[in-house]
Image (tube, rainbow, N blue to C red):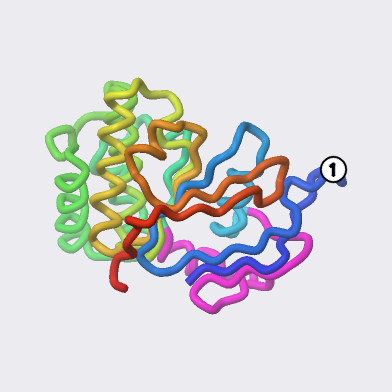
Amino acid sequence: MIQLFHVTKYYDRRPALFDINLQIDKGEFVLLMGPSGAGKTTLLKLLFCAEQPDEGQILVQQRNVARIRPWEVPYLRRRMGFVFQDFRLLPKKTVFENVALPLLVQGVSSFDARRKVMEVLKAAGIDHKKESRPPLLSAGEQQRVCIARAIVNGPFVLLADEPTGNMDPDLSSEIIELFKTINARGTTVVVATHNRQVVEQVNRRVVTLAQGRLASDDRPASDERVGQ
């Protein structure tokens, strides 16, 4: 479903990623590990078309996103979900309005949007806060809103950049359990993290980056892909 062939990305003539070859299949839960500066965020940005590779090819559902036209990017992103580390919620909008925004932009009817938003808010365990505004929520609650917003379109893949980076172990565990539930329903999940607790909790494939290079790709024997 996702394939990278000899992908390299430079910033100021320095490779943030160098000669990356990677395949992620449908239904996988993949953890991107590595210290700060290893290239995890850059890799996610490339998959989300927020950046373009300088060398190599990236295929997402058999489409070469390295050559995608700018006007095609929003259409591809509608089928992808992205959870940002810094939340990026609109502070003056309610939880419901934040999650509904991607649907309204696409022209989904108010009736269908309300149904879908309430479904994902309930799945994320944040439906009781639908009328609240983000500044009044805890970090864990804000992250749940971000996850609800990311999955409201029913994406084929969910990308998350350090989603537990600012949370205590208990909150981190709750968020990871939510990702596992989403994955169990068929969505491919790719999470960038440096938290070893997350690795132990998920017990799935771990792709480790070091200084922009693919250092290791480990899959536990118990790993089973959804839908395969």
Determine which quarter of the picture holds residue 88: top left
**Label 1: how many Cα within 10 Å (few below 14, some 14–19, many 20+):** few
Towards the viewer: 44 or 67: 44
Is 83 covered by the magenta stretch?
no
Query: Which residue ends up furthest to the front in the rendered image?
Result: 221
Is residue 173 positioned above or below 28 on the image?
above
Q: Quadrant of the C terminus?
A: bottom left
Is residue 112 positioned above or below 18 on the image?
below
Determine which quarter of the picture holds residue 173: top left
Q: Is residue 76 left or right of residue 188?
A: right
Is residue 13 positioned above or below 156 on the image?
above
Point 30% across, 56% down: residue:
183
Is 67 covered by the magenta stretch?
yes
Res 90 visible: no
Q: Is residue 3 left or right of residue 61?
A: right
Q: Is residue 212 left or right of residue 182?
A: right
In the rendering, at what x and y percent does residue 142 appear? Answer: 32, 32
In the rendering, at what x and y percent does residue 181 appear? Answer: 23, 51
Per the rendered image, the range of residues in magenta is: 51-80
In the rendering, at what x and y percent does residue 226 appear? Answer: 29, 65
Disc 1 marks which amino acid? Asp
